Amino acid sequence: MNIYDISRRAGVSIATVSRVLNNSPHVSENTRRKVMAVIEGTGYVPNAFARGLGLNTMKTIGLLCPDASDPYLAQALTYLERSFRQQGYDCLLSCTGKDLRARQQGVDLLKSRHVDGIVLMGSSFIENDPADNEYIREAARNVPVVLLNATFPCENVYGVQCDDQQAVMEAVRYLLDSGRKRILFLYHSNNYSGRRKLAGYREAHVQRGLAVDEKLLCFFERDKGSVHQVCDTLLALEKEGLAFDAVLTSEDILSVGALKYARATKRRVPEELSVIGYNNSSLCACTEPELTSVDNKLLAICEHISATMIGVLEGKEMPQTTVFTGELVKRAST
């Protein structure tokens, strides 16, 4: 018997059960009596997870990260750890890599350390096959789970994300409005976020009545998307006769490769070739010219993840999904 079973039998949310266990004033007396009747009838003994900020809490949040060397995730780690620390919580990090089994083991590890909640960092945690996401559902039966830049329809799972589809749509429209006609899209992820970015690229063309040339969609395996590999790929595409006057990428690192290609071919940026990245990372100021990029509001997302987690642990009603709007930060590459 766990808090998930109590909520199902009482016909209320897990958050409501948590509020009852913590004697929160934000519960009606009728609801309180209904939940307590189930608890007393089953002999349920609340543990540290169910009580949230009640007795025996470990004051620790588990962070599950697929790759701490990734610039985007490394920055997110910094923001999350700082935000939780300000709330009086320590963080326990587990790096899993790409393997599904390793991710499942990472969740099990964090649960065994009695963390109060788990943050899954990145949309790569949401698999296309629903069966592969069952470990998330199972974890949420005991502790709140918050997803960075993804959503998962499940009790006690919360998602905080940027609207990647809309952000890419606006970037494509900006390029089209500036006179660009053939926009090469470089991406190296088919996960939840990657699919939304690709959908945004397609939708922007549809809205303008333009056909999408599939040759302008270039996918890189994540371990094959280095700066030099991107440059070499673009050189090969040009040699094959593929014409393009703009490059839009799903991450800034791919755009750095595009700028290296422009220098190698002596194509002037932005006069002859416009380049837009994604994430608005520190790389944008390191290139020449400086890189226009989509700011996906990572700081705001991480701070909201912290607020959502703490709110749930305190027994407050928190939104299941929160979506931030990206912003195109214009620099000299467009």
Image (cartoon, grey):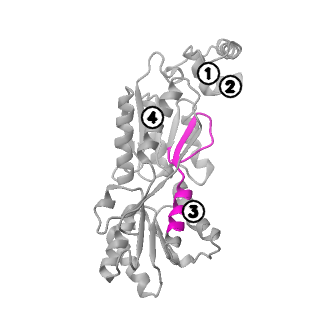
Residue at label 4?
Answer: 306
Between disc 2 and disc 4, whose residue precedes?
2
Between disc 1 and disc 3, whose residue precedes?
1
Where is 306 relative to 175, above or below? above
Q: CA distance from mark 2 to mark 3?
A: 37 Å
Few, some or many residues within 10 Å of mark 4 (<14, 14–19, 20+): many
The answer to the question of whether label 1 and label 4 lie on touching residues, with beta carbons closer than 8 A, is no
Q: Report the amino acid beneath label 1.
A: Val
Residue at label 1?
Answer: 17
Q: Report the amino acid beneath label 2.
A: Val
Q: Nearer the viewer, mark 1 or mark 4?
A: 4
Where is 153 relative to 13, above or below? below
Few, some or many residues within 10 Å of mark 2 (<14, 14–19, 20+): some
Few, some or many residues within 10 Å of mark 1 (<14, 14–19, 20+): many
The numbered dot on residue 90 is none
Q: Is residue 82 left or right of residue 316?
A: left
Which residue corresponds to the image point at 40% horizontal and 82% vertical from the top-left? 236
Which residue corresponds to the image point at 42% horizontal and 32% vertical from the top-left? 61
Few, some or many residues within 10 Å of mark 3 (<14, 14–19, 20+): many
- Report the magenta residues as a range: 148-174
Which residue corresponds to the image point at 71% horizontal and 14% vertical from the top-left? 30
Q: CA distance from mark 2 to mark 4?
A: 24 Å
The answer to the question of whether label 1 and label 2 lie on touching residues, with beta carbons closer than 8 A, is yes
Q: CA distance from mark 1 to mark 4?
A: 21 Å
Task: Choose between 73 and 116: the one closer to the eye.
Answer: 73
Residue at label 3?
Answer: 200
Q: Is residue 65 magenta?
A: no
- SS at circle 1: helix
Q: Report the amino acid beneath label 4.
A: Ser
Where in the figure is residue 127, as x and y percent of width and height? 56, 52
Residue at label 2?
Answer: 12
Residue 162 in view (yes/no): yes
